[in-house]
Amino acid sequence: MQAVTAAAAAGQLLTDTRRGPRCRARLGTTRLSWTGRFAVEAFAGQCQSATTVMHKFSAISQAARPRRNTKRQCSDDYPALQAGCSEVNWDQNGSNANRLEEIRGDVLKKLRSFYEFCRPHTIFGTIIGITSVSLLPMKSIDDFTVTVLRGYLEALTAALCMNIYVVGLNQLYDIQIDKINKPGLPLASGEFSVATGVFLVLAFLIMSFSIGIRSGSAPLMCALIVSFLLGSAYSIEAPFLRWKRHALLAASCILFVRAILVQLAFFAHMQQHVLKRPLAATKSLVFATLFMCCFSAVIALFKDIPDVDGDRDFGIQSLSVRLGPQRVYQLCISILLTAYGAATLVGASSTNLFQKIITVSGHGLLALTLWQRAQHFEVENQARVTSFYMFIWKLFYAEYFLIPFVQ
């Protein structure tokens, strides 16, 4: 402030037209001493410095004005800038949301493909079958302990992993056939690569045997080993293998695993390994084994009816190819109705009235449902053939709910 004041005073002194000549006259006509001359020169230097400061201050003031204008302009443009920023943020958020939606869609698609790869109707059959058979050794509510639950879960998990190995291996060797018969399967459609299929098959095989070995159950390990051997022989293209090419061998594989191995091995696992009781056959176990022999034979025969075109093209001599779909269908219906008739008689022989009512009425209702559904079956209609095959699996599930009541 002092510099600014001095600059103003100097400017006024030097520019004042009235006082300027008087000062010049006074200073010019007087001889100054060294001290006076030094004071005048000092005063002139201060005036010059003040003038310089004034010029600098003026330049700073001129420079500050655009800044204030710019600030005012920025204030005026702020709503537009804010709107632009909001639009950019919206675009970024929308892009992120679209990316997340794409990732979610890809994950769901892969999960659906894995679901189809596992052949869910066989998975449900394994879960329901092992659960029903595991209940047969139970004599009272006291048998339902944590140890029993652990033993049941070990057996179920190992069996499910082996189930996925078997159906996955079959798909690996049937890619070309499935492109005709089942084009929606992940390997046939190209959704899964062959490398992915091989990885899944090996992973579930290792998990199955790992669980079985850790359990220490001889019956469970026996069931896993036999399932592995028969499942491999059924599908693998090698000398003396690929048993699915032959109708009798193919039906034998499915019948032995679904009817005999599941009933006997998992009953023995729960009875002998988990409950620590001596192994003894029961009426319900014998009934389940015999009835499921009939049912498994029907599943093994009927499953080839929708696949007759692809099997014929690739030389698979199934019974449907050799005898024709209509004859095989009639044979399957006859076997099932006969089995239901026998089951009704077995249920009628029960000494417990409640169990007798459940088994007789249950099997009678299932037989009636089968007969009514069979009246509308058309071998030429591929969609109805596939639907009826899935209906047979539902009858298979329902039977396991009735087996524990056969005492």
Image (tube, rainbow, N blue to C red):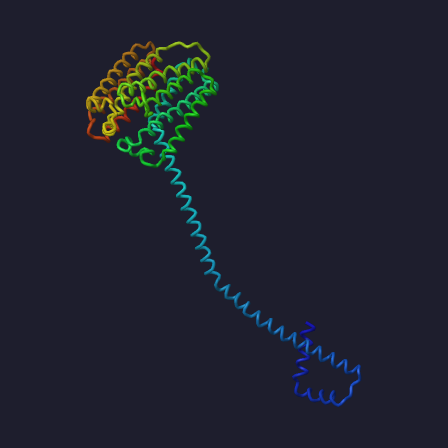
Picture quadrant of residue 376: top left
**Most extreme residue toward the front, as rendered?**
239
Question: Going by the image, does 329 lie left or right of 95?
Answer: left
Q: Is residue 148 above or below residue 82?
A: above
x, y percent for residue 364? 26, 18
Position of the C terminus, as image quadrant, is top left
Residue at 26 percent of width and 31 percent of height: 181
x, y percent for residue 198? 38, 30
| Residue 127 vs residue 71, the one in the foreground | 127
Q: Is residue 365 visible?
A: no
x, y percent for residue 58? 61, 74
Q: Is residue 274 above or below residue 111?
A: above
Picture quadrant of residue 367: top left
Question: Going by the image, does 174 lie left or right of 154?
Answer: left
| Residue 197 vs residue 110, the one in the foreground | 197
Position of the N terminus, as image quadrant, is bottom right
Picture quadrant of residue 285: top left
Q: Is residue 392 visible?
A: yes
| Residue 351 vs residue 55, the one in the foreground | 55
Residue at 35 percent of width and 37 percent of height: 191
Q: Is residue 25 above or below residue 230?
A: below
x, y percent for residue 151? 45, 19
Total of numbered circles in the picture?
0
Question: Going by the image, does 196 lie left or right of 174?
Answer: right
